[in-house]
């Protein structure tokens, strides 16, 4: 059974990684803790569930690809609109305004989702059912969970490649290290901060669309992932890719094993870990001072 | 003493207190209950502003101390029903919230800026998770019911909750609110308050002239948390029921919203903000199913266009209208 718990934990980790990646990028590059991140995740979930429901007749891979692309585009587009209309005014403002505007955006998006999709839950378990299950050392395990892990791994590799090898990534890291110096070197700040915000939002959307085949899209579905991603980012370090990965694995495995053995301790324990790390290493395990 | 009694501010306070005391003659019972809720939240808004305006750190987890106060009342009723009097309940709220904020504050004050906000948020969520999961002791997400207490030996036997709230309890809330406001005014104008502002403006310089920055920030945190606990204790009777939601970060966010709505640069701003927010939310909820849209849009408008809040906006309007002196 330990194997299954580990797999479940890694599956949680995959989700957390996808969710926290976007939060971490936005925090690292722009210095803004985006409280509306969970709502962008919810947009991905609802758009994805809608598309999966629409395309019930199509073959499964097509449905899934269309749903993922649709959800990622929707979240990315909303992220673009948010950055260019609201967030762009916030970089020079005090912390309280930065936090409050994303809090306002959260409320705005939550009700907009209700307005567009109606308040009821949306089920979209078709991809989950279609993939069936496989046998791992005598235990049946849903293929879909493995698919999500593969997707997260792929996304992680992609973002690592972008950040480490491409011109875009090098410029983004330069901004993270020293904003003023980066600007003085002629790095196009405006377009890059937009790119970072859109990228972060799109990752939230990806996590959202991947979750709806297992649990229905409901109102307020982004609240828990936001707070989980927040813990991951705190543990791993603000704005660190490696930190997000390690943080996700710690949180995912802790969650999986405590849920099994001491279900009541799960959330308190996770927050306790986050608090302890904040106290001894406020910059996180992999963050820079 | 005398020089404080005959100032425009003292006069305004006197008038405001009179208005509050005569409000029950004019307001409908329903609005009166909202007023009680708003006044009790105002105590917490004042507490939060001691940190935000005078100490220069933003707590995004003040719901924790509010919850500490409210749960002190609720748990007192649950476990020591024969000790459940109003004065004991409020005392418990003050003591428990002071203890919790002393503990949490001790770790928080070592950080500033976003780390402080994140740490306060995480600690509040820790308390939230504990309150919600320990349902054998705290009632979990169902929460705890808070009945009418006895009041210095006087029993409100046979009185319905509603009558109690629109009758005697209103004056109790006004009294506690007034006392809290005057206390906070004294705190921010004391040498301690001035020293706090010194640590806010220049931490290094404050340290150099002998102010123990972290210790002062910790004291401010405890005072602030205790105000929130008092607020939670008073509010728990108005609401009649408490749930872990008050320790959730969303509620803490609403408190920050209140303070900014009223305007945090003026001492009385948070009070106005708490009252306005209570009514704003009520009207938004009554008007449409999409009330969060209204609250959220208001918040965004506030941040972009009116960063000084309502009082800040009025202040700059008045100073613009005032005829300029020819120099």
Image: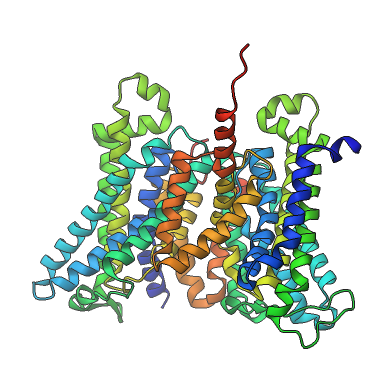
Question: Which quadrant does the N terminus of chain B fall into?
Answer: top right
The residue depicted at 25 percent of the width and 59 percent of the height is A151
> What residue occupies the far bottom of the structure in this picture?
B158
Q: Position of residue B133 (x, y in %)?
A: 58, 74
Q: Is residue B236 at least partly visible in the picture?
A: yes
In this rendering, the answer to whether B116 lies above or below A7 is above
Q: Position of residue A53 (x, y in %)?
A: 18, 73
Q: Is residue B233 left or right of residue B114?
A: right
Q: Is residue A104 left or right of residue B171?
A: left
> What residue occupies the far top of the structure in this picture?
B327
Q: Quadrant of residue A65?
A: bottom left
Q: Is residue A35 at least partly visible in the picture?
A: no
The residue depicted at 43 percent of the width and 63 percent of the height is B291
In this rendering, the answer to whether B18 lies above or below B244 is above
Task: Using the image as rendered, state which of residue B13 and residue A133 is in the foreground.
Answer: B13
In this rendering, the answer to whether B145 lies above or below A20 is below
Q: Quadrant of residue B264?
A: top right
The residue depicted at 59 percent of the width and 42 percent of the height is B311
Q: Position of residue A13 (x, y in %)?
A: 39, 61
Task: Using the image as rendered, state which of residue A260 and residue B202 is in the foreground.
Answer: B202
Question: Which quadrant does the C terminus of chain B fall into?
Answer: top right
The residue depicted at 29 percent of the width and 37 percent of the height is A164
């Amino acid at each position: 059974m330990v194997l299954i718990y580990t797999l479940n934990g890694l599956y949680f980790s995959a989700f957390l990684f996808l969710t926290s990646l976007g939060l971490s990028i936005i925090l690292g590059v722009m210095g803004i803790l985006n409280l509306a991140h969970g709502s962008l995740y919810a947009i991905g979930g609802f758009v994805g569930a809608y598309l999966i429901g629409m395309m019930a007749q199509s073959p499964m891979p097509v449905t899934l690809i269309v749903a993922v692309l649709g959800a990622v585009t929707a979240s990315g587009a909303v992220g673009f609109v948010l950055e260019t209309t609201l967030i762009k005014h916030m970089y020079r403002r005090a912390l309280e305004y930065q936090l409050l505007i994303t809090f306002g955006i959260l409320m705005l998006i939550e009700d907009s989702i209700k307005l567009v999709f109606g308040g009821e839950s949306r089920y979209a378990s078709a991809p989950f059912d279609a993939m069936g299950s496989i046998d791992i050392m005598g235990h049946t395990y849903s293929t879909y969970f493995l698919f999500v892990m593969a997707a997260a791994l792929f996304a992680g590799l992609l973002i690592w490649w972008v950040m480490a090898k491409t011109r875009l990534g090098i410029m983004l890291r330069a901004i993270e290290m020293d904003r003023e110096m980066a600007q003085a070197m002629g790095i196009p700040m405006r377009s890059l901060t937009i790119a970072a915000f859109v990228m972060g939002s799109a990752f939230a959307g990806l996590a959202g669309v991947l979750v709806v085949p297992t649990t229905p899209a409901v109102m307020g579905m982004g609240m828990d992932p936001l707070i989980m991603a927040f813990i991951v980012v705190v543990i791993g370090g603000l704005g660190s890719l490696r930190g997000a990965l390690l943080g996700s694995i710690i949180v995912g495995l802790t969650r999986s094993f405590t849920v099994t053995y001491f279900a009541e301790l799960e959330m308190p324990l996770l927050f306790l870990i986050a608090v302890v790390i904040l106290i001894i290493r406020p910059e996180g395990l992999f963050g820079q001072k | 003493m005398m020089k404080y009694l005959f100032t425009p501010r003292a006069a305004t306070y006197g008038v405001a207190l009179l208005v509050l005391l005569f409000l029950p003659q004019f307001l409908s019972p329903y609005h009166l209950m909202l007023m009680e809720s708003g006044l009790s939240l105002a105590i917490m808004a004042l507490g939060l502003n001691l940190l935000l305006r005078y100490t220069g750190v933003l707590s995004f987890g003040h719901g924790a101390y509010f919850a500490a106060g409210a749960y002190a009342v609720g748990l007192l009723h649950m476990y020591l029903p024969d000790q459940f009097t109003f004065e004991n309940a409020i005392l418990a709220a003050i003591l428990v919230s002071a203890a919790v904020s002393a503990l949490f504050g001790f770790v928080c004050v070592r950080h500033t800026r976003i780390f402080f906000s994140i740490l306060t948020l995480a600690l509040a969520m820790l308390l939230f998770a504990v309150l919600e999961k320990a349902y054998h002791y705290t009632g979990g997400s169902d929460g705890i019911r808070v009945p009418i207490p006895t009041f210095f030996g006087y029993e409100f036997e046979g009185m319905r909750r509603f009558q109690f709230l629109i009758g005697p309890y209103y004056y109790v809330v006004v009294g506690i609110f007034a006392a809290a406001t005057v206390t906070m005014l004294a705190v921010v104008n004391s040498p301690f308050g001035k020293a706090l502002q010194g640590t806010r403006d220049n931490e290094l310089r404050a340290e150099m002239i002998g102010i123990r920055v972290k210790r002062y920030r910790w004291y401010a945190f405890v005072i602030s948390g205790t105000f929130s606990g008092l607020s939670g204790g008073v509010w728990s009777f108005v609401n009649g029921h408490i749930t872990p939601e008050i320790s959730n970060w969303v509620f803490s966010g609403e408190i920050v919203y209140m303070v900014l709505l009223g305007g945090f640069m003026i001492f009385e701003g948070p009070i106005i903000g708490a009252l306005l927010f209570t009514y704003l939310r009520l009207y938004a909820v009554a008007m449409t199913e999409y009330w969060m849209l209204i609250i959220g849009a208001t918040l965004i408008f506030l941040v972009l266009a009116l960063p000084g809040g309502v009082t800040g906006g009025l202040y700059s309007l008045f100073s613009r209208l005032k005829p300029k002196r020819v120099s």
